[in-house]
């Protein structure tokens, strides 16, 4: 296992993302053309061995939103994914027990949702019982047995909140002060406060926090001072999804745990699993240290 590194194939993925986002942002070709050109210029300028794919994606999203005047290009897709996962949740959850490992696997199942995937593919993933290809559950369990305190649960895609809630509730019953953290505003298909409350789970998942930033993953320097204070005070940080892994897997922070499906080969290679496998692990920068 190692931190995420940008790969040549990431360029193709970013290009596909630009095309999808432009199409979602506006049907007007007079706006699509300059938005596409500006975003592709960002990829050409910023794609280098030291770059983080999610960071490039963030720049592309913001320029597309600015040029098209569309603040939430994925609003319709988020609503559709939320409605779909809300309908599917009870049937999927019935296959899992109520212990910590089962609830982590259930939460991971929700990460199968993705804007590049058709509904049939997501359905196949949801109905296939999640098993971890990589798991550091024992280490996490020991950490939970220590002094309880603030635990930040960094949410990922809209719709996953249904699958996150049982795990959040369980961690709270263990005595942890769990803050469910959403994005500070619309970005890609990531969960915001508005999305969460529209789904009917806002009250159940409260108390909440948001990053104060509109970024895929977490770029700490771009978040609000209030969130940075929370980040500094947390005893455990549980981060859902590939965007968080891309942006934070290089951090040597022993508080970090990632819960995700490796939906692409670069992330799978970093985790040391097959594409499509699920993982629950500490940040690789710590796991590679025998004293970590």
Image: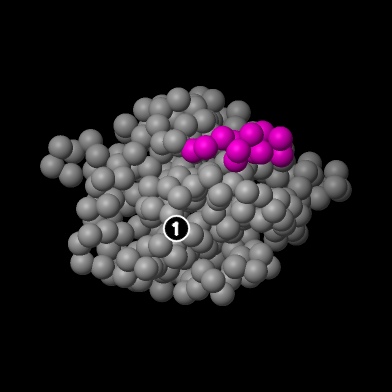
Q: Which residue occupies 48% across, 59% down?
A: 166
Q: Residue under label 1, please give it.
A: 167
Residue 124 on the magenta segment: yes
Whether residue 187 can be seen here: no
**Crowd rating for badge 1 (residues with CA inside 10 Å; few <14, some 14–19, many 20+):** many
Q: Which residue occupies 50% across, 57% down?
A: 164
- What is the quadrant of the C terminus in the image? top left
Q: Which residue occupies 36% across, 34% down?
A: 134
Q: Is residue 198 left or right of residue 229?
A: right
Identify the colour scheme used: one colour
For this orientation, the residue located farthest to the left is 291
The span shown in magenta is 117-130
Question: Where, by quadrant of the figure, is residue 120 drawn?
Answer: top right
Q: Which residue occupies 44% across, 65% down?
A: 169
The majority secondary structure of the magenta stretch comes to helix
User: Where in the figure is residue 118, as x and y percent of width and height?
Assistant: 71, 36
The foreground one among 57 and 262 is 262
């Amino acid at each position: 296992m190692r931190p995420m590194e940008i790969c040549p194939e990431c360029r193709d993925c970013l290009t596909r993302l630009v095309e999808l986002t432009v199409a979602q942002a506006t049907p007007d070709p007079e706006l699509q053309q300059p938005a596409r050109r500006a975003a592709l210029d960002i990829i050409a300028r910023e794609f280098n061995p030291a770059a983080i794919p999610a960071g490039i994606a963030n720049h592309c999203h913001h320029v597309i939103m600015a040029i098209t005047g569309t603040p939430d290009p994925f609003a319709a897709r988020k609503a559709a994914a939320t409605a779909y996962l809300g309908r599917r949740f009870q049937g999927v959850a019935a296959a899992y027990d109520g212990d910590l490992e089962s609830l982590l696997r259930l939460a991971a199942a929700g990460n199968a949702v993705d804007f590049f995937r058709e509904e049939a593919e997501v359905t196949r993933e949801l109905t296939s019982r999640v098993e971890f290809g990589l798991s550091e559950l024992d280490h996490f369990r020991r950490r939970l047995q220590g002094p309880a305190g603030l635990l930040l649960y960094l949410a990922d895609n809209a719709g996953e909140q249904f699958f996150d809630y049982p795990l959040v509730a369980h961690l709270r019953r263990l005595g942890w002060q769990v803050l469910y953290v959403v994005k500070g505003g619309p970005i890609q298909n990531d969960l915001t406060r508005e999305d969460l409350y529209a789904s009917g789970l806002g009250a159940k998942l409260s108390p909440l926090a948001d990053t104060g930033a509109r970024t895929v993953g977490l770029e700490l320097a771009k978040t609000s001072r209030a969130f940075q204070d929370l980040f500094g005070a947390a005893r455990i940080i549980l981060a859902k999804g590939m965007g968080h892994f891309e942006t934070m897997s290089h951090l040597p922070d022993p508080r970090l745990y990632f819960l995700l499906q490796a939906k692409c080969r670069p992330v799978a290679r970093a985790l040391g699993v097959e594409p499509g496998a699920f993982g629950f692990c500490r940040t690789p920068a710590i796991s590679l240290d025998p004293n970590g």
